Amino acid sequence: MPDPVVHFEIPADNVERAQGFYSQSFGWKVNAIPGMGYTLFHTTKTDEKGMIATPGNINGGMLKRQSPIERLLITVQVQDIEASLKAIQKNGGKVLRGKSEVPGVGWTAYVQDTEGNPLGLIQSLR
């Protein structure tokens, strides 16, 4: 089975302005996480545990524009983040930020494809 796209991230120079734009333009629920410098966007209905209610839909996030997230990027859910990092490098990609833990969520990393596009990876705890 292919690794699915499960999340997107939007970098912003003015996070508050951008939050208002997406909230007012598309009706997305904005959930800024204090102390983390990160905003979650709820673009679709979720259940009481915060899980996506409609298969195939995704939610996303926003953060201050910074390396390696300087452009819109998608996050791909992988089964084994270390194996994925090796495969990406073997196939001509680069690791921009190696494996790091997001407590209670899983492991993330940022990579670059052969065309210079950044991608996020996540290995979920679930």
Image (cartoon, rainbow, N blue to C red):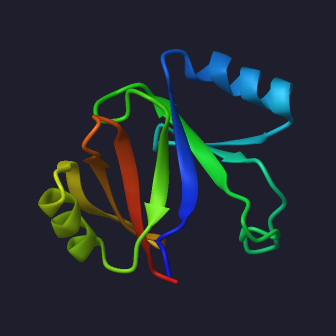
Q: How many marks?
A: 0
Q: Which quarter of the picture shows residue 57?
A: bottom right
In this rendering, would 114 be left or right of 65? left
Residue at the spot 82% in from the left edge and 72% down from the top edge: 47
x, y percentage for residue 11? 48, 29
In this rendering, would 92 be left or right of 116? left
The answer, for residue 10, to whether it is visible in the render is yes
Q: Is residue 112 above or below residue 5?
A: above
Residue at the spot 47% in from the left edge and 37% down from the top edge: 37
In this rendering, would 72 be left or right of 53? left
Residue at the spot 74% in from the left edge and 21% down from the top edge: 21
Residue at the spot 84% in from the left edge and 60% down from the top edge: 45
x, y percentage for residue 125? 46, 81
Q: Is residue 41 above or below residue 14?
A: below
The answer, for residue 33, to whether it is visible in the render is no
x, y percentage for residue 26? 83, 32
x, y percentage for residue 94? 17, 48
